[in-house]
Image (tube, rainbow, N blue to C red):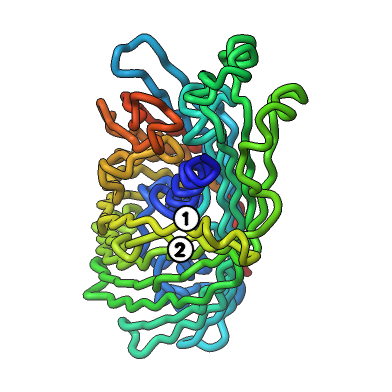
Amino acid sequence: MKKILLTTFLVGCFSIAFSEGYQVNLQSTKQAAMGHVGTAMKLGAESMHFNPAGLVFMDKAVDLSAGASFIFSKVDYTSVDKKYSASTESNPSTPLYLYAGFKIYDNLAAGISLTNPYGSGLVWPANWNGAHLVQDISLKVFSIQPTVSYKILDRLSIGAGLMIYAGNVSISRALIPVGWGTLGMVPQLQPLAQAYPGVVPAQAALTGTAKVGLGYNVGVMFDINDQWTIGASYRSKVKMKVEQGTAEVNYANETIRQAISPLMPKLDQGTFSASMPMPANLNIGLSYKPINKLVLSADFQYVFWKAYKELNIDFSPEELSSNNISSVKNYSNSFAVRLGGQYTITSRFDVRLGLYYDKTPVNDEYYNPETPGTDKLGFTTGFSFCPIRNFSIDVAFSYVHGLKKNDVSCPAGNSFVLPGNEYFTGDYKARAFIPAIGLSYKF
């Protein structure tokens, strides 16, 4: 039984904690308002993320930029028979960015950035019917990127950056589902199961800090003429590895702990290691400036999620190695199409609009409420105001609508845990509202 419970808990935990739905495209408030386009735009210091080749087109000696987004997401679950429903709590995630760009010569620029390319969080009710799949989850990945950009010709530039990744993950999940499953049929435990039918008897919380991972971000940009610009960038895959993850097991109360702790896996008596890829990204962009006050841009982003083929979790010390787990995932590559525009109303005020379609990489057989994977539509808007010369206050608003998934079945573990029902099936609807604010200054 211990082995069954452990497998049920861990395979789900890390399959999502390092994968689908964790790529964050919120590295600029201005670009968030334009549907996250930017591969073919000259964005000053913020080009370090979107296309390093654009950094060299800075129009000042120093370009500084900082900002943060506030992701208010909500996921609704409804059972197939429509008799049960649950929703996540609105605890915001807060990805941030910092950029500093420096013009060295007319044809050479350098800079450094700090961004959150991956990260998310969801909090489900502690005692909801899917608590054996997830109660809450949080992932934060930080990228530090020193960057160099060089202008080969007046209209042609290249750029490259070294991506230095670090991060951490935490997830809480029930070891025994609400209702106690088969455990509630054990004679000596029946009184407890009847006394606490709507609570999670035992819950585990796993946390881990990943080792530093290295990758690269390269790009090229070309001005076809004064109106049209094309650009392309590639961010490499980075493997993140947790080597000394830890866990703790919690119980609903002391009476339950004394009764069932001998049956629980000893997660807190060892450590685990696991590794997952942060996928490579290929971005191709086109921008058009029909008049001086208007810029239109389109991006195509291709994400190589197929790199996530399997999950391996290894335990130590040696006496825990019998619990090692290998799980096939076989995710699919995905893409996003982005459109955006910016119009300058006055020398102090710009307005922006954008939209995008983002296809999920998650196959239906791997569906899970830890981050419900759906194709998404995003609608964005925002503005910039310059109260003084060279200083900009940027604001953006995004609404993300996940296309509803109906009657999706998630493997819920061995039937020994959930008798007569090996799958957790239902309908999911996801959406998010994301305000963002940024400040930029150049001199």
Q: Are marks 1 and 2 in contact (CB under 8 Å)?
A: yes
Q: Nearer the viewer, residue 41 or 106?
A: 41
- Which mark is on residue 18? 1
The answer to whether 246 is drawn above or below residue 233 in the figure is above
Q: Is residue 153 rendered to the left or right of residue 238?
A: left
The answer to whether 45 is drawn above or below residue 146 in the figure is above
**Residue at x 47% of width, y 35% of height:** 133
**Residue at x 52% of width, y 59% of height:** 322
Q: Nearer the viewer, residue 37 or 329?
A: 329
The answer to whether 88 is drawn above or below residue 365 in the figure is above
Q: Which quadrant is the C terminus positioned in?
A: bottom right
User: Which residue was labeled with disc 2?
Assistant: 276
Instruction: Examine the image and state in which quarter residue 273 appears.
Output: bottom right
**Residue at x 29% of width, y 18% of height:** 80
Q: How many numbered dots are placed on residues in this image?
A: 2
Q: Nearer the viewer, residue 365 or 139?
A: 365
